[in-house]
Amino acid sequence: MKTVKILVEALPYIKRFHGKKILIKYGGHAMIEEEAMDSTARDTVLLKYVGMEPIVVHGGGPEISRAMNKMGKEPKFIEGLRVTDEET
């Protein structure tokens, strides 16, 4: 019954976004945890099956920070957004 309830709740959104492009930001942290990777893959496939057009965009935050640290640069964030200078 839980699955049926979830599908009934999702139906208006499935109808509303059918045939629409859906942007998914697949950030660096989600790429580190196996469960998050699996969940993202399953959810992306589900969106395609119900008629949406998922577009996955790579975030890469942790990888960028590691690369900056290796270069001797300190990652800088303002209100959660990465700020980089021209050299970076």
Image (cartoon, helix red, strand yellow):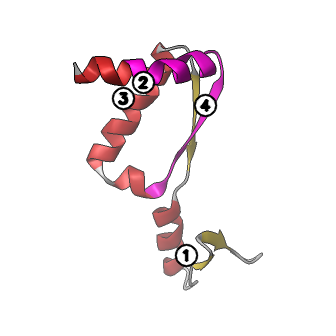
Query: Residue 54 got which mark?
Result: none
Contact (CB < 8 A) between labels 3 and 2?
no
Q: Is mark 2 in CB contact (under 8 Å) with mark 1?
A: no
Is disc 3 in contact with disc 4, using a CB cutoff of under 8 Å?
Answer: no
Q: Which residue is mark 1?
A: 68
Between disc 4 and disc 1, the foreground one is: 4
Observer-side mark, 1 or 3, equals: 3
What secondary structure is marked by label 3? Answer: helix
Q: Mark 1 or mark 2, which is nearer the start of the sequence?
A: 2
Amino acid carrying mark 4 in the image: Ile
Amino acid type shown at disc 3: Arg
Q: Position of residue 85 (x, y in %)?
A: 74, 78
Cα separation, mark 4 vs mark 1, equals 31 Å
Q: What residue is disc 2 on?
A: 9
Query: Pointer 4: what residue?
Result: 22
| Closer mark to the observer between disc 3 and disc 2 | 2
Task: Name the residue furthest right.
Answer: 86
Name the foreground residue: 55 vs 43.
Answer: 43
Q: Which mark is residue 42?
A: 3
**Among numbered discs 3 and 2, the one appearing first in the sequence:** 2
Q: CA distance from mark 4 to mark 2?
A: 19 Å
Estimate the spatial distance between the alpha carbons at disc 3 and disc 4, rounded to whole Å: 15 Å
- In the image, residue 56 sits, relative to residue 88, either above or below, namely above
Which residue is pictured at 54% across the width and 85% down the height?
Answer: 72
- Magenta highlight range: 8-28
Hey, what amino acid is under mark 2? Answer: Glu
Is residue 27 magenta-colored? Answer: yes
Which is nearer the N-term, disc 4 or disc 1?
A: 4
- Residue that appears at 64% across and 15% down: 19
